[in-house]
Image (spheres, rainbow, N blue to C red):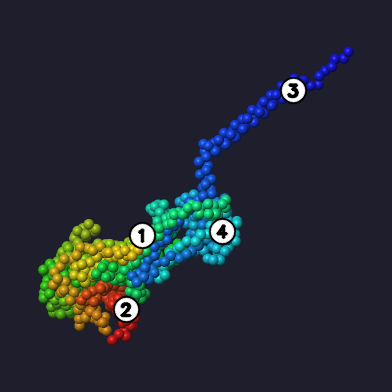
Amino acid sequence: MPQHIALKDPHREARIYSARTVTAIFIVLGLMAVILARYYALQITEYETYRTQSERNRVQLQPLPPKRGLIYDRNGVLLADNRPSHLLSVVVERSPDLEHTLDELRKLVPISESDLENFYDKKARRRPYEPVPLRFRLTEAERAILAVNRHRLPGVTVDAQLLRHYPHGALFSHAVGYVGRINEREAFELDASDYRGTFHVGKVGVEKFYEDTLHGDVGYQNVETNAHGRVLRVLERYDPTPGADLTLHLDIALQRTAHEALGEQRGAVVAMDPKSGGVLALVSTPGFDTNLFVNGISSADYGALRDSPDVPLFNRAVQGQYPPGSTIKPLMALAGLESGLVTPEYTVPDPGWYRLPGDSRRYRDWILKIRGTGHAPRVDLEMAVEESCDVYFYDLARRLTIDGMYEYLHPFGLGERTGIDTTNERRGVLPSTRWKRDNMNQAWYPGETLSAGIGQGYMLATPVQLAVAVTALASEGRHFSPRLVKSVDGEAVPAPELAPVAATADHWQVVQAAMREVVHGKRGSARRIAKGIEYEMAGKTGTAQVIGIAQGEIYREEEVAERHRNHGLFIAFAPYEDPTIAVAVIVENGGGSSAAYPIARRVIDTWLLGEEIAAVAATGEAG
């Protein structure tokens, strides 16, 4: 009988099935355990972390930049304004392919290499999800193009902001200054929390000196956004604190008059109120349009300003250091009186030149080339100031000595910064034996004392220093550190008063009377501007040599290159009895003081008589 062979082993298959089932169950349980563990981590242990990340994707903290304070002149005329503008920015985290986005943007709107450089610079220093500015001042047409293409520009935003604007351009370029984009150095120096959302900072002038006052405090808002970064709603908002508004002592009519009077000439005018120290006008020519710098000046425009031989970026009023020439003679006269070396009646013989004892060299008086002789056989103090007699002050300087001159002239503010509330002021030079030893490691020579006695040689002063000195002359020793800002948000900012210049009342009056004769005397060196004048003015002319003239040679202006001609200077105050304005004028290479004192007359006319009368006087139509 045949034997049956089994085709399947049910017991073996049952065992295999059971093993597979158990294995599957363990795998499923293991996977479930992993899922549960991960779920536990997400929901329990790491809940706050992922909740925060989720909120960051949905809720953003956005800075609210403060409105920059406005700047006005003393009459309420707006000098620095904020105007609405639109800004193109990119949120890097919301742009998957940044380079592609930038390429697309360049196809739609003009974006310069400078814009890109600033973008990458700002990108390296920004916070997560903070928009990085790419282009300022978008036109309406550019905004429309970007709006139409927004669907293919992830991370791109167009926001409204306020940008600085200077309505008067070059007129206040050196006084008010300007703001510009924050550069890398400034980004490290500034407190990042105070400048979140702000892309500009004061660069020079009042804008920089009062940066903390003008800037204000940043605010912020929490906003809810969708997956594309669009704001759905504002959750909370803390408004920024706007910057304070500044009112300056500057007078726009006076500023315009000084600017127009200088015209195409290189020079500076500083006008001050002797009673308060307020700066009524501060002009340096040529100037420049400050609006060019607000959003980053182009290479071509900056190159033109930088390479100009007239150096328009140079603030001559506070940075220009010039030999003061004969404008220091009233100060020297007061020093002579106070030291007892001269009296009002003391006279000096004047053959037109001066010679040191034991020295054959002749130090010429400027009058020698005109008359062939001196001012008079003998010259007293009043004539010496009125006619600007060099011989008289050569003799006084020799007897006073250079260190004595330093002692008496330093209290007027020469050789030191005045402390004016602007940037980059220079200190000038008031020489002494110690100064030359410390700076040049050389001894002082007697002939150098004579040159310093008429404001030449090593002596240098800025126009604002001369303005401070003439306020001391006008106020019989009282003077202030000059101030451009008159008030902050309506609260007065008084100018710091400097240590008074000590001198007796009689001596002040002698010097002031001599300065009056400079303008109103029959032989005064500025008598030409007295024609038709409706008030009394005291002043002093000055001429500063640019190049040296050899012994025995005569300076002939027509034979000298324009940039090597003498500088013209003039200081003045008016009205004589109760001065309300003091002025210092410098005209570079103007040929002499005759280029400077008509400018001072126009400025003072404007202040005392008004713009219309000053304009008539400038045309020569006054009686």
Residues tagged 4 and 2 counted as in contact (Cβ below 8 A): no
Quadrant of res 146: bottom right
Quadrant of res 466: bottom left
User: Which residue was labeled with disc 1?
Assistant: 213
Q: Earlier in the sequence, mark 4 or mark 2?
A: 4
User: Which residue was labeled with disc 4?
Assistant: 105
Residue 176 position, x and y percent, is 36, 66
Q: What element does badge 1 sit on?
A: helix
Q: Amino acid at mark 1?
A: Thr
Residue positioned most to the front: 235
User: Which residue was labeled with disc 3?
Assistant: 13
Which mark is in front, 4 or 1? 1
Q: Earlier in the sequence, mark 4 or mark 1?
A: 4
Q: Is residue 252 left or right of residue 50?
A: left
How many numbered marks have been drawn onto this rendered protein structure? 4
Q: Is residue 557 left or right of residue 391?
A: right
Residue 205 position, x and y percent, is 35, 63
Q: What element does badge 2 sit on?
A: loop
Label 2, label 3: how far apart the Cα atoms are: 118 Å
Residue 246 position, x and y percent, is 35, 64
Residues tagged 3 and 1 counted as in contact (Cβ below 8 A): no
Q: Earlier in the sequence, mark 3 or mark 1?
A: 3
Quadrant of res 5: top right
Q: Residue at x 51, y 50 (%)?
A: 59
Q: Earlier in the sequence, mark 3 or mark 4?
A: 3
Q: Amino acid at mark 4?
A: Leu
Label 3, label 4: how far apart the Cα atoms are: 69 Å
Residue 531 position, x and y percent, is 26, 83
Looking at the figure, which quarter contains the C terminus?
bottom left
User: Which residue was labeled with disc 2?
Assistant: 610
